[in-house]
Amino acid sequence: MSNSPNAKTILVTGGSGYIGGRLIPLLLDAGYRVKALARTPEKLVGRPWGSHPQLEIIKGDVLNRDSLMVAAADCRAAYYLVHSMLPGVADFAAADRNAAHNMAAAAAQGGLEQIIYLSGLGENTGPLSHHLQSRTEVGNCLRQGSVPVTILRAAMIIGSGSASFEILRYLVDRLPVMVTPRWVSTPCQPIGVRNVLHYLVGCLEQPQTIGKTLDIGQPKVTNYRELMETYAEEAGLRKRIIIPIPLLTPRLSSYWIHLVTPVPASIARPLAEGLSNPVICTENSITELLPQELFDARKAIRLALDRIRQQQVETTWSDSGNLQPAEWSAAGDPNWSGGSVFEDTRELTLAATADEVWPAVTSIGGEVGYYYANWLWKIRGLIDRFSGGVGLGRGRRSSPTLYPGDVIDFWRILALKPGEQLLLVAEMKLPGKATLSFKLTENDQGNTTLQQTARFLPRGLLGMLYWYAVTPFHFFVFDGMLRGIAKATGKPVTAGPSKIRILHPPGDS
């Protein structure tokens, strides 16, 4: 290993994703300097380790070769943990090939010693699903460069918040009787997320992994029926009835998964297609190179459920994706944004400090709900789900803490200033764009004004009609939400709630 100051600098692409968000703190704890590449750095800055002195967060994108070149400079190795299988990406395989070529070129120019890529299991003995074929192509693209690549091939990753585990969890939790495709009996070799992370970190210290393709998985081969049965037992549920139907296609399965679980059809479909491919380890040399206790499916499921019950989920599948800017959500009437912004602002004042009010504000969504008329929010979530949106099923990653980029049902946190402001941007299906913000202002007497503002940027006539259609509900839903937040604080209300009109200075327009 080089003796230069940057010898232990490691680049992590996909740092705001499910695996990357768990890997970075482990690398920091192990003494590495880390460069984290993110399209939205704000999603990393707010994490508990976001201000670590050994961490450098770099704004960039693997699809932008120049930004990737800058990130890879002076690094010893890079983790490639990105994929384009996200809502709104029409051809994720083409985007992934382009990104992999960029990574190979940046690694070569930066003089890296190793690229570590987390891929998917699946043999080319038969037709692979589009998703698994794309994972294989990415590995081939990375290997076309001059930097040696370590490929870890994994099947289903069992861990709190992973897309595959969330599909399993919600299907078994919600359906005592399940009609499934034939893939329910497909052989698979899942692996716990803690085991995956151990292998990823270990590859940096074990030179014999460089340039190798290594299969990772639990020792025992199982199938998806057995995983469902094991989950039901660990979750304390009654035995589930599983009925395989040969005519149920992956496309139909993805729609069913979309309706029953928080995972959208755009992600569920490629995952469902991959379930028909046997995914088992064909070689096990990594168990000797990097020995560890490999959890069986039962223990991995138990650990994941413990994390969920304790509300200590570090990262989730929904963390991936860009934070969409919403300049129009600021105060004013920005005509440059394409039209007038509709606004509904209400406030109340409590005999409490901002710190006493803040926990009630940040508990919104998930199991707590919206403090008033939750049945209306649930109906809105069902409408969104049936129209192809995300609905309310995503819930929250954690109850005690929130970070920029976190999901709260069909919202995502765009900005967060503890004790001052929470800004949510809507990710539901809408004829326009919407935000919901909460602002706390504490006065000299120790009273706090809680201001709640809904803003909507309509798209065409349909957007305007939508706003006028929902406006009557605002009068009791939004007032009720403010009263509910106040009640949750246990502090008396001294004024409000009342609807107010904010006069914006001319410069805000």
Image (cartoon, helix red, strand yellow):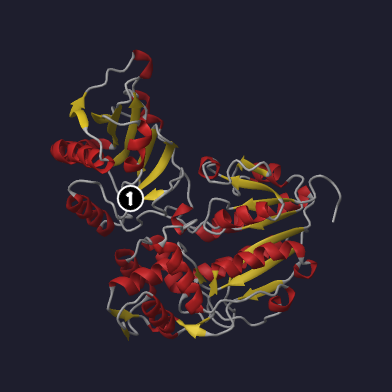
Task: From the viewer's perspective, tell me whether residue 35 is left or right of residue 405.
Answer: right
- 485 w.r.t. 177: above or below: above
- 274 w.r.t. 73: above or below: below
Residue 166's x, y, as percent?
A: 41, 66
Q: What residue is rendered at 46% in x and 45% in y?
A: 403
Q: Which amino acid type is marked by label 1?
A: Phe
Please state, as top left, top right, bottom left or bottom right, where the C terminus lies in the image: top left
Q: What residue is rendered at 17% in x and 48% in y?
A: 373
How many other residues sit within 10 Å of disc 1, few (<14), some (14-19) or many (≥20)? many
Q: Is residue 102 visible?
A: no
Furthest toward the right, the residue is 3
Please state, as top left, top right, bottom left or bottom right, where the N terminus lies in the image: bottom right
Residue located beneath label 1 in the image: 410
Q: Secondary structure at mark 1?
A: loop
Residue 66: name its quadrant.
Answer: top right
- 215 w.r.t. 385: above or below: below
Residue 276's x, y, as percent?
A: 46, 79
Residue 169: name its quadrant.
Answer: bottom left
Residue 186's x, y, as percent?
A: 46, 84
